[in-house]
Image (cartoon, helix red, strand yellow):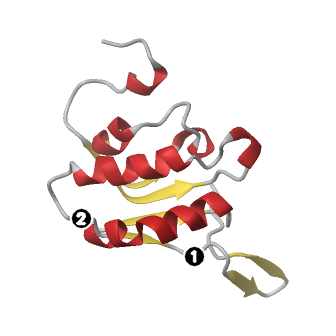
Amino acid sequence: ASNSPKSSLPVGPPVYVDLAYIPNHCSGKNTDPEFFKRVRASYYVVSGNDAANGEPSRTVLDALLEGKAQWGENLQVTLIPTHDTEVTREWYQQTHEKQQELNIMVLASSSTVVMQDESFPACKIEF
């Protein structure tokens, strides 16, 4: 077994969850296709908004496609970017056909919701 942080998932069957936060602001430092093969979520949150640090990482977004392709089931997956970034927009446009083939939907992150005295991005996530 490798000592790489990317291969630190325990051996076993995939885990199914409703919502998964892509680790480390969608940085390529800790997430690879194995994460998406093993952590199967209905919704993945992408919160990266720091291009200087490679967040979000195009490599991680591509890993989602690669990992999801290995599921063997065509479950609906929704990607929730919390920021509108150039990387996310380019990835969406360049891989849109593959996303459709894999049943992956990407929510628009540039929408705004206005409620009473507050206005916020439509993909605001609070824990």
The extreme left residue here reads 72
Q: What amino acid type should be assigned to the residue bearing mark 2?
A: Leu
Q: Nearer the viewer, residue 74 or 62?
A: 62
Q: Secondary structure at mark 1?
A: loop
Which residue is drawn at the image coordinates 53% and 50% (left, top)?
Answer: 58
Marks 2, 1: nearer the viewer: 1
Direction from residue 50 to residue 81 in the image, left or right: left
Residue 108, disc? 1
Which residue is drawn at the image coordinates 62% and 70% (left, top)?
Answer: 123
Q: Secondary structure at mark 2?
A: loop
Rendered image quadrant of residue 65 = bottom left
Q: Residue 107 location in percent, x, y? A: 52, 73
Q: Residue 77 location in percent, x, y? A: 35, 64
Q: Quadrant of the N terminus?
A: top left
Number of labelled discs? 2
Which residue is identified by label 2? 75
Q: Residue 68 location in percent, x, y? A: 29, 53
